[in-house]
C-alpha cells in the first residue's frame, strides 16, 4: 500500500483521522499556524502540526487550514472569523497536548453541542424515518409499501370493518 510509506504512516489512516478531538466553531473560516522548523520554543507546535493537523483538517472540511513556516520569531495560531475578526493564540513553549486542550477550550465546540449535533445527524440520516422534516413525507413513498388510504382505497380484506364481519360469520 503506497499510503503506508513514509514517516508515521498511521496519520493517514481513517481511524486515526476520526479520533480528532477538535471540531472548530461554525464562525471560523481560516485557521492559520505560524512556526519555525528549528528552535526549542517551536517544538510543541511542530509536534502539533505533525500529529494533530491532519485530524483538524479531516474534522473541519469547510475550514481553510494554512501553515506558515520560518516567518515568525515566536509561534502562534490565528483564527479568522466570518465577520472579519481575528483571534490570536500564543503557543510559545507549549507542548502539543497543552495546545490541543487550549484550542478545544477556546475555539472548539463544546461536548454538549457535539452530542446534540450527533443526535440530530443520526435522526436525519436514518432511512427508516418519515414525516415532517425527514427525507420521506409518508411511508407510502417507499417501494413495496401499502399506498395511503386517502389516495388509493385499501382492499376489502384489509379493512377492519370486513374483518369484524368475517369473525362474526365464523
Image: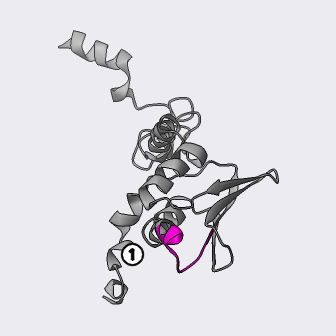
Which quarter shows the C terminus? top left
Q: Residue furthest front?
A: 40
Q: Residue furthest left?
A: 170
Residue drawn 36% across the image and 83% down it: 7
Residue 148's x, y, as percent?
A: 50, 34
Rendered position, 128 above or below 17? above
Residue drawn 33% across the image and 88% down it: 5
Residue drawn 38% across the image and 23% down it: 159
Point out the stretch of residues depicted in magenta: 34-43
Residue drawn 40% across the image and 32% down it: 155
Q: In front: 86, or 127?
A: 86
Q: Is residue 50 magenta?
A: no
Dot 1: what SS?
helix
Residue 117's x, y, as percent?
A: 51, 41
Residue 154's x, y, as percent?
A: 44, 31
Where residue 37 sits, quadrant-wise, is bottom right
Relative side of 146 to 124, left or right: left
Relative side of 168 to 58, left or right: left
Rendered position, 80 above or below 121? below
Relative side of 141 to 89, left or right: left
Residue 59's x, y, as percent?
A: 50, 59
Q: Is residue 42 magenta?
A: yes
Judging by the rendered image, the residue that carries numbered circle 1 is 12
Rendered position, 59 above or below 74? above
Circle count: 1
Q: In front: 54, or 162?
A: 54
Which quarter shows the N terminus? bottom left
Relative side of 168 to 67, left or right: left
Amino acid at each position: 500500500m503506497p499510503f503506508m510509506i513514509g514517516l508515521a504512516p498511521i496519520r493517514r489512516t481513517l481511524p486515526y483521522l476520526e479520533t480528532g478531538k477538535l471540531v472548530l466553531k461554525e464562525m471560523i473560516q481560516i485557521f492559520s499556524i505560524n512556526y519555525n522548523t528549528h528552535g526549542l520554543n517551536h517544538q510543541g507546535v511542530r509536534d502539533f502540526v505533525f500529529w494533530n493537523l491532519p485530524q483538524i483538517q479531516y474534522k473541519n472540511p469547510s475550514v481553510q487550514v494554512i501553515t506558515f513556516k520560518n516567518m515568525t520569531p515566536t509561534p502562534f495560531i490565528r483564527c479568522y472569523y466570518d465577520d472579519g475578526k481575528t483571534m490570536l493564540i500564543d503557543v510559545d513553549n507549549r507542548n502539543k497536548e497543552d495546545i490541543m486542550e487550549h484550542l478545544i477550550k477556546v475555539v472548539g465546540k463544546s461536548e454538549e453541542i457535539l452530542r446534540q449535533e450527533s443526535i440530530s445527524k443520526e435522526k436525519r440520516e436514518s432511512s427508516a424515518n418519515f414525516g415532517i422534516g425527514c427525507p420521506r413525507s409518508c411511508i407510502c413513498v417507499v417501494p413495496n409499501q401499502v399506498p395511503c388510504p386517502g389516495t388509493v382505497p385499501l382492499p376489502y380484506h384489509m379493512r377492519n370493518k370486513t374483518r369484524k364481519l368475517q369473525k362474526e360469520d365464523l
